[in-house]
Image (cartoon, grey):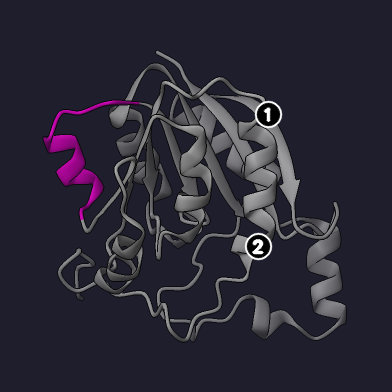
């Protein structure tokens, strides 16, 4: 079995559709505009091509985006400026730097993780005490799943042929549960794209607890 590291991981940013950026950025901005983050450094985990990270960086003092995909970071680094930087670096390497952040985001990443609890534990290590973690993931629920099946879209939605595609499918309850288990207190829950209960994604604003 091949171990996925930043040396051999490469998400296809040319052929994979990232249309979710269009609805997510509006929803994320609606959350951030109510928070006082102008003096806060942001770490965006799994920043991909950097487009969404760049859009929200204006709410923060300084923003760092990281991703395992060299192709994605090649795109993202074209957006670098004095308040925004992108790096092809793993969470483990960030932890080794012993730098902590007051605010961490991760958009549509956790569903790609074989061990999402391990992923969250690493996020926890990078957060300052009482730090904030904003996470989004595709929404899965009974009515949405029923509609997908009725429309014959099962193979499209749960496509096993998508390289580095989704391998975890979270509901409100399962995402809440794993966040609580990893010592994150959920502050807000929001939906993004379409309308509930057929929303594209769900967004959880959380706080690190001791």
Residue 23 visible to the viewer: yes
Q: Residue at x 31, y 54 (%)?
A: 80
Q: Residue at x 78, y 66 (%)?
A: 145
Q: Residue at x 52, y 44 (%)?
A: 56
Taking the magenta stretch, the answer to whether it contains residue 96 is: yes
Q: Is residue 13 above or below residue 35?
A: below
Which of marks 1 and 2 precedes in the sequence?
2
State the image coordinates of residue 69 (x, y, percent, origin top left): 29, 68
Instruction: Please report contact status of discs 2 and 1: CB closer than 8 Å, yes or no.
Output: no
State the image coordinates of residue 126 (x, y, percent, origin top left): 29, 30
In front: label 2 or label 1: 2
As drawn, the label of residue 100 is none
State the image coordinates of residue 91 (x, y, percent, origin top left): 25, 46
Instruction: Choose between 171 and 193: the one closer to the eye.
Output: 193
Q: Residue at x 34, y 40 (%)?
A: 83
Helix, strand or loop at mark 1? strand
Q: Residues within 10 Å of mark 2 (few under 14, many from 20)?
A: few
Q: CA gap, disc 2 to disc 1?
A: 21 Å
Q: Which residue is mark 1?
A: 188
Q: Which residue is mark 2?
A: 22
Q: Residue 173's image quarter?
A: top right
Which quarter shows the C terminus?
A: top left
Helix, strand or loop at mark 2? helix
Instruction: Choose between 22 and 199: the one closer to the eye.
Output: 22
Instruction: Choose between 197 and 75: the one closer to the eye.
Output: 75
Q: Is residue 129 above or below residue 28?
A: above
Q: Is residue 209 above or below residue 181?
A: above
Which quarter shows the N terminus?
A: bottom left
What segment is highlighted magenta in the picture? 89-101
């Amino acid at each position: 079995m091949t171990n996925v590291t930043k040396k051999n991981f490469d998400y296809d940013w040319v052929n994979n559709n990232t249309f979710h950026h269009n609805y997510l950025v509006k929803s994320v901005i609606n959350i951030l505009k109510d928070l006082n983050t102008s003096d806060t450094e942001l770490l965006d985990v799994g920043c991909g091509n950097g487009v969404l990270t760049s859009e929200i960086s204006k709410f923060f003092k300084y923003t760092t985006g990281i991703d395992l995909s060299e192709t994605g970071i090649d795109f993202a680094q074209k957006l670098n400026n004095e308040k925004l930087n992108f790096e092809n670096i793993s969470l483990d390497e960030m932890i080794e730097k012993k730098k902590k952040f007051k605010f961490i985001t991760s958009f549509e990443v956790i569903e790609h993780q074989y061990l999402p609890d391990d992923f969250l534990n690493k996020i926890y290590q990078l957060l300052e005490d009482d730090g904030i973690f904003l996470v989004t993931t595709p929404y899965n629920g009974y009515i949405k799943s029923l509609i997908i099946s009725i429309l014959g879209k099962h193979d499209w939605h749960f496509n096993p042929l998508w390289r580095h595609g989704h391998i975890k499918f979270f509901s409100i309850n399962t995402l809440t549960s794993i966040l609580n288990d990893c010592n994150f207190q959920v502050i807000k829950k929001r939906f993004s794209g379409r309308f509930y209960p057929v929303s594209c994604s769900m967004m959880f604003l959380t706080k690190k607890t001791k």
